Structures are given as structure tokens and as C-alpha cells.
Image (cartoon, rainbow, N blue to C red):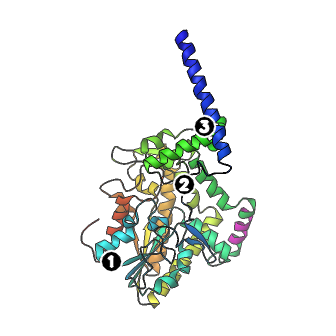
Amino acid sequence: MRAIGGWLRNAGLVLAAIVVFEFVLQGASLVLPVVEDRTRPKIPRTLVDEQVGHRGNPAYPGIDARGFRNDDAVGQADIVALGDSQTYGSGVAPGEAWPAVLAEHIGRPVYNMAFGGYGAIANRIHLDEALALKPDVVLFALYFGNDFFDDFQLARTRGELARGNPPNRLAKVERRETARPLRDEIVHLYRRGRKTSQKNAVVAWFTARSRVFGLIRNLVRAIEGHDGSADTPALLGREFERARAALSGPASTFASAHDDGAWRTILTAPYRLRALDDSDPRIRAGIEVGKQAMADMAARVDAAGARFLVLLVPTKESVVHGRVAEPAAHIGLVDLAAKEARLRAEIAGYLAARKIDHLDLLPVLRRAPSQPYFGDGDGHPNATGQARIAGAVAETLGKTDGGG
């Protein structure tokens, strides 16, 4: 009993010290930035752009003077790559993004003009900048995961939805948007994937406001080389086992784990399925304006005497679907794979009918010798996946060294 009493007294003294220290730090923080997180980047990665909504910030590390992910804003490039975050190379180092790897394969400069959130319309708007570089080849990567949603959003903002969409569909679009904006639905699904922590409300409140906790967190980040971003949700933490352990509660209605011994990753089929659901007139409207934008790009590139090649970039879920023993056990996966396959065939048919070259990357990524995606819920290709894309594009262009 005496030992227990001594332990309790010591614990009480420690707790009292923490409380006193907390008050001291809270007070000091009013006049001094004692525990502010100095590791967080102060420079925003994006800036507002009147034409496409946003663009990369030249002041941000790794972004060139034009707002794209290149070492320099070159005056000429043999090849220009257009696309979204899949082509930008989210999650990998600049030299691992497929446009950079492609340049190594073919020994020719490749300028990366892709950015997250850019669909066909945003890239069509940037085409004049691309053609000003006098390229021999313009590549456009269409991502089935959310490009149709992005095209819908930008086309509606710019008043371009009437292109390829009949009045009755546009009327349905406005009714659905009035009832609930599509962006709200998509963002809601995305946020469900981030809310994997089941913290007690009191604990969550304390950790968010405690100066002691903040100081400890920042010291740990500094020691581990943390980039200073907000606490990473388990589903996006790069660790498969940690992400799989988080698949409970709300996360179980949003994601599922795939583990076949060789490939281990988290699938988020419901999120991707919502952005591909063309039974919603807004997604169908986005598909139609996106197709028109690709046709416009092809005609303008051809008129400039260059080659235009469309890359059909699949979702991670469709790539992994080919390896899943029981697809029905994964929420939304069967429906997503079927819908994506139908839309892929539709887009490929549209391009073929207009003699627009295209390359389907689904089989390329499925045949990867090792897992081409991260082990968490991130849908972007990892370095292996990026290299596979680069190798396939190099082969298609007819100048490859056999790598990839």
C-alpha cells in the first residue's frame, strides 16, 4: 500500500507539473511564438487563376516560373505532358514523375504542365502555352478517377456546359446542383476517408489546443524529419498495416483492404465510383464537355504540326481489380470496375472515330512486376507505377531503351 501511495503521489506531482507548464506555455504564446510549428510550409502551393481556378505558385519549392513542376520554365521542349495530379506526380519526387522518367528514356526534354484538379478543359486552356514551346508531341493524360467531375465544375463556371449537352440534360443538371452541389457530395466522401481517428472528444479537444502536446509533437516531427503538415490520417499514412487497422466505423463504408501477398493497398471504390457515376447528369455533362475538349486539343495540335497522344489513366481500384479473388467483398469495387470499363470503351471509341491516338494504361499497370501504387489509400501511382507509364509512353512514341 505504501508503494502504491508513493506512486500516486509521484503521478500527482507529474500531472501538476504538466498543468503548470501548460499554463506557462499558453501565457508565453501570447507574446512569443514559443511552440508554433515552424516546420509547416509558409508558402501556398497554389495561386488563384482566373482561367482555370488555380495554378502552381512559382514561389513554392519545385514549381517553375509558369506554375508547373519543372526545374526551369524552358523556352522550348520536344514533348509537353498535360494532365492532373497523376501526371504531376503527387506522392513521388519530381524526378520520379512519369514525364521526368520519360525524358530519361528517350533522351529528349519533356515539359510537365500537369497539375492537380486539371481535367481536359483546364488543359485545353493551357494548350496555347504548351504549343508556344514548339513541341513535336503533346501528351494528355485523362484520369478516370475524377477528371469528368473536374471538367463539369470548370465548364459550369465558364458557361461551357452547353457544348455537347442538350437542354433537357442541362435542366436536370441545374435541378441537381440546386438540391445539393456535386462538389459537396464528392468532398463529403473524401473527408470520410480522412476521418479515421476515433479519439474521445475531450482528448481531441485537448490535443488540438494543448501547448505541451504541441511542443512534444513538433519536437518529434523535427527529430523524424516530418514535413510539418497536419497529422496524417491513417488511410494516407503510407503504412498498409496501419491503414488496414483504421478500417472500422465510418472508414469501413468508404474503403477496403486488398492483400494478395504481393500487392497490399487500400481501395476507395465508393469515392471513385461517385465521380464516375454518369447516371448523374452532371457527370455525364462533364464527360461530354471533356470529349469536346480533347477533340479541340487534337485539332489544334495537328494544326501546329505536332503529334497528339491521349493516355487513358485508370483508377487504382480498376488496376487492382484484376488481382482480387473476391471483388464483391470490396465495397463498390464491382460497380466501379464495370462502370469504368464501359466509360473507357466509350472514350476510346470516341477518340478512334476521330483518329486521335490513345494509349490505354490499364494493362500496362496491371502487368507491373511489383506493386505500382502506395500501400495506403492514396490513388496516385508510386515510383514503380510512374516508371511503368513512362516506359509505355516511350515505347508508343517509338523511342525507348527497353526500360520500364
Q: Say which amino acid is labelled 2.
A: Arg
Tell me whether circle 2 and circle 3 mark residues in contact (CB < 8 Å): no
Is label 1 in a helix, a strand or a loop?
helix
Please rate how many residues cluster around mark 2, counting C-alpha atoms within 10 Å: few if below 14, some from 14 to 19, many from 20: few
Image depth: mark 2 or mark 3 in front: 2
Q: Say which amino acid is labelled 1.
A: Leu
Residue bearing mark 2: 38
Residue bearing mark 1: 397
Is label 3 in a helix, a strand or a loop?
loop
Q: Which is nearer the eye, 146 or 202?
A: 202
Query: Image point 66% across, 38% down: which residue?
Result: 23
Q: Quadrant of the N terminus?
A: top right
Left or right for 171, reference 83 = right
Q: Quick check: is 172 in the magenta stretch?
A: yes
Image depth: mark 1 or mark 2 in front: 2
Q: Disc 1 and disc 3: Cα gap in Å? A: 52 Å
Is label 2 in a helix, a strand or a loop?
loop
Q: Quick check: is 199 in the magenta stretch?
A: no
- Can residue 323 be seen here? The reply is yes
Residue bearing mark 3: 199
Q: Which label's residue is closer to the chain start, 1 or 3?
A: 3
Residue numbers of the magenta segment: 169-176
Query: Image point 55% across, 15% down: which residue?
Result: 6
Q: Disc 1 and disc 2: Cα gap in Å? A: 46 Å
Q: Where does residue 125 sit, x and y in percent of width and height?
A: 56, 80
Q: Where does residue 41 sit, x and y in percent of width and height?
A: 54, 60
Q: Say which amino acid is labelled 3.
A: Lys
Please rate how many residues cluster around mark 1, counting C-alpha atoms within 10 Å: few if below 14, some from 14 to 19, many from 20: few
